[in-house]
Amino acid sequence: MLDIYLQTTWETFYMVLVATGLATIVGIPLGVILIITEKEHIYPNAFINKMIGALVNIFRSIPFIILLVALLPFTKLLIGTRIGTEAAMVPLTVAAIPFLARVIETALKEIDKGIIEASRAMGASPWQIIRRVLLPEALPGILLGIIITFVSLIGYSAMAGAVGGGGLGDLAIREGYQRNHQDVTWIVVTILVVMVQVFQSFGDWTVRKIREKRGLI
């Protein structure tokens, strides 16, 4: 069983890592758009702000297990299969994008508006403000948001096992629940708890070091 635990732990880590990476690529730009299109920000646009905000809220409000099932046809079309580690990445990514977008938006809102106004007064373009002011200033919050997303997806990945998503969740359902091997279930739970603790602690340590370097703490 040791080989099985190691394999399924790797599958869980792999699917969560890829989903978090893809969500970061899409979620950070969405979060930036949400903040800069607000009224009196560097690129106010009420239509875009409300449209993206509505889409983010809609997808955030859907429970993951329902989203997982609803996306099965799309997953089949995109990946070619509805089961397995690669297939589970699709709903994990879709679920993570709106969550991360809101986290990024919150991190960007904490930036002192005086810094933004000073940059505008110096003639900086919206792109320059985003690249040289917003993202660098919000870096600790952005990193913490990515870590929180990663940790949350570990729990979501276990739910993906309900539809043959692979990883530890699939092992817990097939071996632990369906075959009534309670020891397997508890070992899977222990591994998931350890994974969450390790990555959350690493994320907190990284953010703390960045803040210490900037003299924020």
Image (cartoon, rainbow, N blue to C red):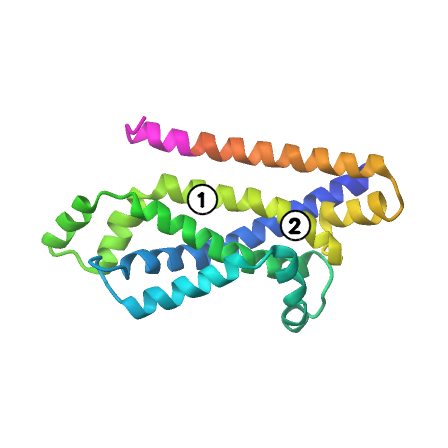
Which element is circle 2 on? helix
214 inside magenta stretch: yes
Vertical relation: 10 (above or below) 164: above
Q: In the figure, is residue 80 to the left or right of 61?
A: right
Which of the two residues, 1 or 194, is positioned nearer the viewer here? 194
Q: Amino acid at mark 2?
A: Ser
Which element is circle 1 on? helix
Secondary structure that dominates the magenta span: helix
Q: Where residue 141 sits: x, y (%)?
A: 38, 41
Residue depicted at 40% across the width and 54% down the height: 28
Dot 1, crowdedness within 10 Å: few (<14), some or many (≥20)? many
- Where's the C terminus, which quadrant? top left
Q: Which mark is residue 186?
A: none
> In the image as oriented, which residue stretches furthest toward the right?
179
Dot 2, crowdedness within 10 Å: few (<14), some or many (≥20)? many
Residue depicted at 38% across the width and 58% down the height: 29
Which residue matches tag 1? 145
Q: Amino acid at mark 1?
A: Gly
Q: Where residue 133 sits: x, y (%)?
A: 24, 48
Vertical relation: 109 (above or below) 25: above
Which of the two residues, 29 or 50, is positioned nearer the viewer here? 50
Q: Earlier in the sequence, mark 2 or mark 1?
A: 1
Q: Quadrant of residue 65?
A: bottom right
Q: Where residue 102 sits: x, y (%)?
A: 42, 52
Residue depicted at 74% across the width and 61% down the height: 83
37 inside magenta stretch: no
Q: Which residues are magenta?
A: 207-217
- Where's the N terminus, which quadrant? top right
Q: Where residue 15 sits: x, y (%)?
A: 63, 52
Per the model, the C-alpha gap separating discs 2 and 1 is 18 Å
Which residue matches tag 2? 157
Q: In the figure, is residue 203 to the left or right of 32?
A: right
